[in-house]
Image: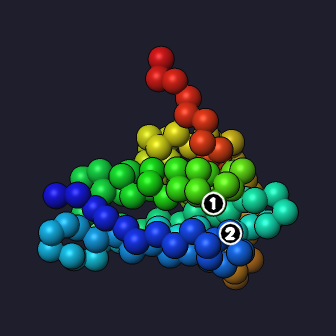
Amino acid sequence: MSAQMAIWPKEVAQGIKQSFVIQIEPTGEIIGLVELDPIKAKVATAALTIFIGRAHRRQLFAQEALQAVLDWGIDVVHLSRIDGVVMRGNTASMALLRAVGMTDRGEMPGETRSHEPLVARLFTYSGKRRSKA
């Protein structure tokens, strides 16, 4: 089985958040979602969000979908950078972002909507994959 996504490039290029539904072939079951939310149109950057249903985690669906969206964002929409933020301790998500070639830029302190302290890690992707040593 593999995942498939529908992609509409024009909307992100126009500064509109784009959602990609992840479906399993051939059943059409929806198992997740990837979103690109433009950050700054002038510098062509976007923020990334991904969700995969619990039953479909650790089966490479997330990696396959995420890699497709990242490559599409760089190659088709011509984004200069795509950012992802992962909460401290979420090692599975950190491993996923590293697996698709995103670079860990370190801790990024912030706060929640209720103003509680929050520490996350910033990952970036510019289309240049690091060679595996």
Q: Is residue 78 left or right of residue 129?
A: right
Which one is in front, 18 or 112? 18
Q: Identify the residue position indicated by label 1 in the image.
A: 77
Q: Is residue 102 left or right of residue 115?
A: left
Q: The disc labelled 1 sits on which kind of residue?
A: Val
Q: Spot the residue most to the right.
A: 42
- Residue at the image point whose x is 23% and y is 58% from the top: 2
- Residue at the image point whose x is 47% and y is 43% from the top: 100
The answer to whether mark 2 and mark 1 are in CB contact below 8 A is: yes
* Image location (x, y in percent) of residue 96: 43, 48
Q: What is the quadrant of the N terminus in the image?
A: bottom left
* Image location (x, y in percent) of residue 112: 68, 74
Which one is in front, 79 or 66? 79
Camera sees residue 69: yes
Q: Quadrant of residue 38?
A: bottom right
Q: Residues within 10 Å of mark 2 (few under 14, many from 20)?
A: some
- Residue at the image point whose x is 65% and y is 44% from the top: 126
- Residue at the image point whose x is 61% and y is 73% from the top: 10
Q: The disc labelled 2 sits on which kind of residue?
A: Ala
Camera sees residue 123: no
Q: Earlier in the sequence, mark 2 or mark 1?
A: 2
Q: Residues within 10 Å of mark 1 (few under 14, many from 20)?
A: some
Q: Identify the residue position indicated by label 2 in the image.
A: 13
